[in-house]
Amino acid sequence: MTESRTPPAQRVHEIDVVRGFALAGILVANIGFFADPGHSFLGGLPSTDDPVTTAITILVLTKFYVIFSFLFGYSFTLQMRSAERAGVSVRARTLRRCLGLFVIGVLHGILLWVGDILTLYAVLGLILLGLRDIRPRKAVIVGSALISVPALLLLALAWLSTLAPEAGQAPVGDPAAAARALSLATGGPLDYLTLQLELYPMLVAVIWGFQGPMALAMFLFGLAAGKSRLLEEPERWSRLLPRVQWVGFGAGLPGAVLFALTGADEGPWQLVGLAVTAVTAPLLGAAYVATLLRLVRRYPAAGRALAPAGRVAASNYIGQSVLACLVFTGYGLALAGTLSPLAVMGVALVIYTVLLWLSALWLRGHRYGPVEYVLRRFTTWS
């Protein structure tokens, strides 16, 4: 059987740049678990007593996965066009891609990082496939509802918890379970794998339940932007950037501060903080992207440094987990629980720098990253 081949589509440089930048935020958000795996048993957000942890909670947590989700939705439109140019079924290709993404996500989640989001993206990708003919305006309306309705429900729950305060109390953390998690994480490879298997079902449920609606909303926003070819026409988006910054930082930063201040609360204010950040995190994420695009237009070298990592984002995402495991878990140095938050950020900087360098080096001789190659072969079935 002869396969018809079409010339590859030109990559959208801005998408690669933003994706490469978002990888840094994802790493900073995730590395805290590797450094302190017992925290998941203590409940709540990290304490705001430490200035580094406070800054991460305000500026990073919940902000960068929304950027990644938006880019996933945008890239979906590029993949649809690629399938149409090749004369193959968009549905068949997407089904295979989502299946491949799900398998990679399960392996990643069990072996390396229980907070994996690829399985969620794979499932939501099937929903996006069903909604692929939706008009951009309607996609924005549905996405906005997916954000606002859960936020309103959280506010209602916060109000109800004031009527019965004991019902709104979060479960008390278990220090013994936290100590056991740290012991398993820093034991041998089999100990760490045991911890992964214990935590994976619980964290999958949490991620799908709490991040699912927001991720789908951002998928739809990205789908709407991709259908409008927004990022492919700089003359359209460049004039919007200052306004996005004003609105995003103006509303997003106060919401992020409230999120950090109420995260450790065990009463209704924690629910209020979650509701507020559900609405403001996408705004702050948009402000980050607008600032980055303006910076890259002024200093193109910054874009050239970030773009290679964005081109092989899946390989970098897995690579972050591999390197973090080698530093913090029984797979390697087993430094979990021994480093200060500032030192952990130093490790994150080293990991990110190494992966930027490896991405650029790899792409000198390859078109796709290792994970992208496997996923592409599975998607195209060739």
Image (cartoon, grey):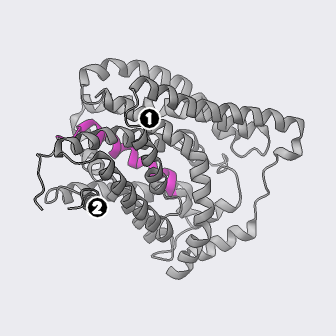
Instruction: Determine whether, in the image, residue 40 is placed left or right of residue 86.
Output: right
Question: Residue at coordinates 46% horizontally, 34% vertically from top-left?
Answer: 285
Query: What residue span does the magenta drawing correspond to?
Result: 10-31
User: In the rendered structure, does residue 239 fall within the stretch colored magenta?
Assistant: no
User: In the rendered structure, does residue 26 fall within the stretch colored magenta?
Assistant: yes
Task: Bin the neighbour count of mark 2 within 10 Å (Cα to Cα): few under 14, some 14-19, many 20 and up.
Answer: some
Residue assigned mark 1: 220
Percent position (x, y) of residue 211? 56, 46
In the rendered view, tell whether residue 265 sits above or below residue 375. Answer: above
Inter-mark Cα distance, 2 to 1? 25 Å
Percent position (x, y) of residue 306? 28, 45
Residue 256 visible, this angle: no
Task: Tell me the quadrant of the picture where the N terminus can be found.
Answer: bottom left
Residue assigned mark 2: 378
Task: Bin the neighbour count of mark 1 within 10 Å (Cα to Cα): few under 14, some 14-19, many 20 and up.
Answer: many
Nearer to the camera, 127 or 244: 127
Question: Residue at coordinates 24% horizontally, 39% vertically from top-left?
Answer: 81
Nearer to the camera, 367 or 254: 367
Instruction: Determine whether, in the image, residue 217 is placed left or right of residue 268.
Output: left
In the rendered view, tell whether residue 380 sits above or below residue 307. Answer: below
> What secondary structure is the stretch in magenta mostly built from?
helix
Residue 367, image quadrant? bottom left
Percent position (x, y) of residue 78? 27, 40
Task: Tell me the quadrant of the picture where the C terminus can be found.
Answer: bottom left
